[in-house]
Image (cartoon, rainbow, N blue to C red):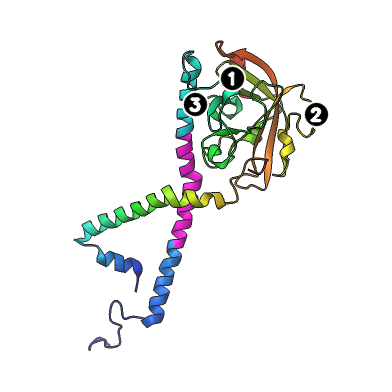
Amino acid sequence: MADGPQAAAPARGRTRGGPLGAALGLGGELLITLGVLLVLFVAWQLVWTDVVADAEMDQEVASLEAAFDDPAATAVPGLKDVKFGQAFAIVRIPQFGLKYARPVYEGTTRDVLMHGIGHYASTAMPGELGNFAVAGHRTTYGKPFNRIDDLRRGDVVIVETRQTWFVYRVSSTEVVAPSRADVILPVPEQPGAEPAEALLTMTSCHPEFSSRERYVVHATLATTYPHAEDLPADLLTRRG
Amino acid sequence: MSFYGWLWRGLPGPFAVKLLLALVLVLGVVAGLFTWVFPAIAPLMPFNDVTVDGR
């Protein structure tokens, strides 16, 4: 065994295995490639879209803040003149973090929601009688409403516009089917009812990483302050 | 027979150059996926709908 050439040993390289071996080798590489592609897609969806959208939203909030502070700026339209896709307000929710600030754009198409919170175009504007309804991602694309299920009755949702700080307080939360468009009616779930209050409704997907249901938060306008004034410090605190 | 083996043998130069070229190829493919392919197939995924009016 120690002496003599090992004539039976296969030659190195490409002749081993024949056509079957070649097919198995290629098939294996294909499967490994598919696996890597899937991992890459998940990383893109769960990490990269957040990185991109977070940077974009921070920038949009900064330019809105600058425009709100500058009486001569014309980049931000009045609430009556907002066009589809335009940013016109900033949502601040102390319970999501004292620095939490996300831009609100007009419209709720997929494309708009990739860049921030979207305002259902058919619903009221902030402070108006009726329902200022907005939608935001629970996961991916900056996930502005990631912690929507942390909100409890009484929690503060602040909508900042050029003229006014609108302070809403959460009144109720619910989980509904995706078809329940009646949660964003002027008086939620009461078709045809005449609104007597200024409400805010937030919708996002539920459970997290799924679109099977919608998480819905209703809030009622509690107070408003002129934008020229500073907000009372006690509003900007987190619950317990 | 192996696609990646064929690719590796096709790359010119000594080992270090081959490695660098392979790395550039991989980064190029990932950039293409992130820029064009993944954004195009994301709307087909069933976990990104957040509205209640079906749009």
Task: Report the span colored magenta.
Answer: A34-55
Up the image or down, A39 lies above or below A95; here it is below
Q: Inspect the magenta stretch and tell me whether residue A47 lies in it.
A: yes
Q: Which mark is residue A193?
A: 2
Q: Mark 2 and mark 3: span between their CA atoms?
A: 35 Å
- Measuring from the top left, give residue B13's x and y in whole percent: 19, 61
Q: Please rate how many residues cluster around mark 2, counting C-alpha atoms within 10 Å: few if below 14, some from 14 to 19, many from 20.
A: few
In the picture, which quadrant includes the C terminus of chain A?
A: top right
Quadrant housing the N terminus of chain A: bottom left
Residue drawn at (28%, 78%), measured in percent from left and top?
A12
Name the residue type under label 3. Answer: Val
**A56 inside magenta stretch:** no
Question: At 53% from the left edge and 29% from the top edge, which residue is drawn?
Answer: A86
Q: Is residue A60 left or right of residue B21?
A: right
Same-chain status of marks 1 and 2: yes
- Give the camera-side residue of A186 and A144: A186
Q: Which mark is residue A61?
A: 3
Secondary structure of residue under mark 3:
helix
Counting residues from the N terminus, which is met first, the one under dot 2 or under dot 3? 3
Query: Which of the two discs, 2 and 3, sits closer to the camera?
Result: 2
Q: CA distance from mark 1 to mark 3?
A: 18 Å
Residue under mark 3: which chain is it in?
A
Q: CA distance from mark 1 to mark 2?
A: 34 Å
**Residue A162 falls in image quadrant:** top right
Residue A236 spot, x, y in % from top left? 59, 19
| Of callouts 1 and 3, the N-terminal one | 3
Report the chain holding disc 2: A
